[in-house]
């Protein structure tokens, strides 16, 4: 049983060992070759050319998060559309109808968000 396991997965185990070894070597080389005395400009809070004038932990408007969530939702919709389009010939009319129902529900949600003003920026 162990011989069959090693025969099937030996190349993957070798690949993982080489990848782990190379990762450790690269991290060690980076640690040894990196400069140990960075200049004060590099150690400053910001590298934009001027001193900070506000606290970096200021509150953000909730619209930033709302737009980000809406982007993720519609990005996932596109992620569902690509495999559906590829396999449309195999899944037939039922697959087409189910995707149209999915797109209809998402369109209703998009219209609702639009009417509520979630996409308006002041």
Image: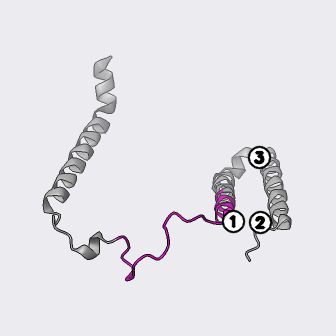
Which mark is nearer the camera, 2 or 3?
Answer: 2
Horizontal arrangement in the rendering, residue 12 relative to residue 99 (left or right)? left
Q: Quadrant of residue 70?
A: bottom right
Residue at the image point whose x is 28% and y is 37% from the top? 11
Q: Which residues are magenta?
A: 45-72
Residue at the farthest left position: 32
Neighbourhood count class around disc 2 (C-alpha, 10 Å): few under 14, some 14–19, many 20 upward: some
Q: Which residue is mark 3?
A: 95
Q: Is residue 3 magenta?
A: no
User: How far is mark 2 from mark 3, CA to CA?
Assistant: 32 Å
Residue at the image point whose x is 36% and y is 70% from the top? 45
Q: Measured from the top left, where is residue 93 in percent x and y?
A: 81, 48
Q: Could you tell which of marks 1 and 3 lies nearer the N-terminus? A: 1
Residue at the image point whose x is 77% and y is 46% from the top? 95
Q: Which mark is residue 118?
A: 2
Q: Measured from the top left, where is residue 96 in percent x and y?
A: 79, 51
Q: How is the image coloured?
A: one colour
Q: Measured from the top left, where is residue 27 in percent x and y?
A: 22, 53
User: How far is mark 2 from mark 1, CA to CA?
Assistant: 7 Å
Q: Are marks 1 and 3 in contact (CB under 8 Å)?
A: no
Q: Could you tell which of marks 2 and 3 lies nearer the N-terminus? A: 3
Looking at the figure, which quarter contains the N terminus? top left
Horizontal arrangement in the rendering, residue 16 relative to residue 77 (left or right)? left
- Say which element carries label 3: helix
User: How far is mark 1 from mark 3, CA to CA?
Assistant: 35 Å
- Say which element carries label 1: helix
Most foreground residue, 33 or 41? 41
Looking at the figure, which quarter contains the C terminus? bottom right
Q: Quadrant of residue 75?
A: bottom right
């Amino acid at each position: 049983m162990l011989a069959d396991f090693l025969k099937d997965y030996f190349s993957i185990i070798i690949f993982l060992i080489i990848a782990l070894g190379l990762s450790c070597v690269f991290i060690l080389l980076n640690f040894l070759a990196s400069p140990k005395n960075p200049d004060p400009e590099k150690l400053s809070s910001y590298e934009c050319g001027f001193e900070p004038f506000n606290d970096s932990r200021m509150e953000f408007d909730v619209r930033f998060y709302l737009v980000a969530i809406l982007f993720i939702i519609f990005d996932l919709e596109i992620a569902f559309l690509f495999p559906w389009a590829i396999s449309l010939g195999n899944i037939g009319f039922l697959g087409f109808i189910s995707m149209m129902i999915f797109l209809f529900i998402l369109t209703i949600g998009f219209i609702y968000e639009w009417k509520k003003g979630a996409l308006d920026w002041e």
